[in-house]
Amino acid sequence: TINITMPASVRAGDAALLDASNSFDPEGDELTFSWDLNAAEDSDGDGDPTNDVDADTQTVLLDTATSGLILGMLRVDDSAGAFAVEPFSVNVTTRTFQVVWVTETVEVSWDEYLDQGETWTGNMTPGEMGRVMAFNAVLELNRDVAPPHDNFTLALQIPEENYKRTVNTEPGNYTTNEPARAEMTEERINEPGQDGMFTSDSEEALLRQLLSTREANRGQGTWIWSVLAKQSDPDALVGDLDPDPGNDWTLMVEVVIMRPTLTEVSIADSNK
């Protein structure tokens, strides 16, 4: 006689305890247990998914990863060759999360020196932290002692999206000590995130879903910034010597993101 106790349902990611320790044989024979923990999977690869032996103990912890109905089978044998089988099912339910979006600004800066013709590159991945909404990048050169101003190029590439933009530095005003600079800006890159209740098998799966939806997944890849010293004219001419073959520069990047915060709630709370 097989006697299985188990929860009627569990949430995805939790383990269900299957307990057949109260099974017995009327003649008192010693029993052996053979659990097929998922009749939809052929874990032993013999072509029959209903005869697997995934565990042989009286109690089993059934791990779950995705929501849905898990169907299984327990076979119990005695020492005289008699046996009994009993199917079982465990309903794996989704989890419920309250999602609140928080707006944050991510700031990254670099400063280097480049000679004429040299190029610098640097990477960032702001989409790992949230949904990208806007960005502003400012490349500023060290102030030249005398005209003409140096000419640098700022470029941004996101290879996964075939995105590329370039801007050139504009001369500053010598009378007000303004350095040459280039600015790159983009607004409303994605739609804002919406607060609310969402269901998913796990927090990680829901985060992936929220940050990679087709309507709001721009800017999720690696951002490759580059600075090219296109032309660096001398500050003063001394014969054929160039006393200023390059220039110092600073790049400041600000990216506005919306980051989802998740709080798991019970079904009762979600129905309020």
Image: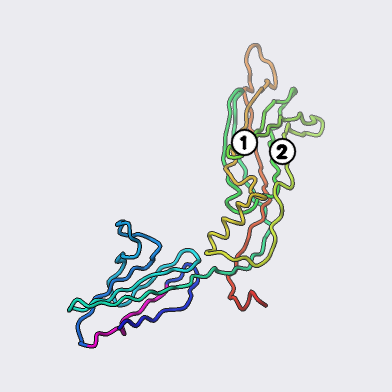
Q: Is the magenta stretch mostly helix, strand or loop?
A: loop
Q: Is mark 1 on a helix, strand or loop?
A: loop
Q: Quadrant of residue 54?
A: bottom left
Q: Which mark is residue 219?
A: none
The residue indicated by pointer 2 is 184
Residue 125 image point, x, y percent: 58, 46
Vertical order, 248 against 211 (above or below)? above
- Badge 2 crowding class, 10 Å Cα cut-off, few under 14, some 14 to 19, many 20 or more, is some
Residue type of the residue flagged with mark 1: Asn
Residue at 70 percent across and 39 percent down: it is 138
- The residue wearing badge 1 is 162
* Residue 182 location, quadrant: top right
Tell me how far mark 2 sits from mark 1, CA to CA: 17 Å
| Marked residue nearer the N-terminal end (2 or 1) | 1
Q: Which quarter of the rendered picture does the C terminus lie within?
A: bottom right
Q: Where is residue 157 in the image (x, y as percent from the top left)?
A: 62, 36
Q: Pick the residue in front: 178 or 129.
A: 129
Q: Which quadrant does the N terminus fall into? A: bottom left
Image coordinates of residue 259 in percent, x first then y, are 64, 57
Asked if residue 130 lies in the magenta stretch, the reply is no
Relative to 162, is 229 above or below? above
Mark 2 or mark 1, which is nearer to you? 1
In the image, is 149 to the left or to the right of 37? right
How crowded is the residue under tag 1: few (<14 C-alpha within 10 Å), some, or many (20+)?
A: few
Q: What residue type is labelled 2?
A: Met
Q: Nearer the viewer, residue 225 or 239?
A: 225
Magenta region, residue range: 16-26
Residue positioned 63% across, 20% down in the render: 243
Residue positioned most to the left: 80
Q: Which of 231 and 242 is in front in this view?
A: 231
Q: Does the magenta stretch include residue 25?
A: yes
Q: What is the tally of numbered marks visible in this picture?
A: 2
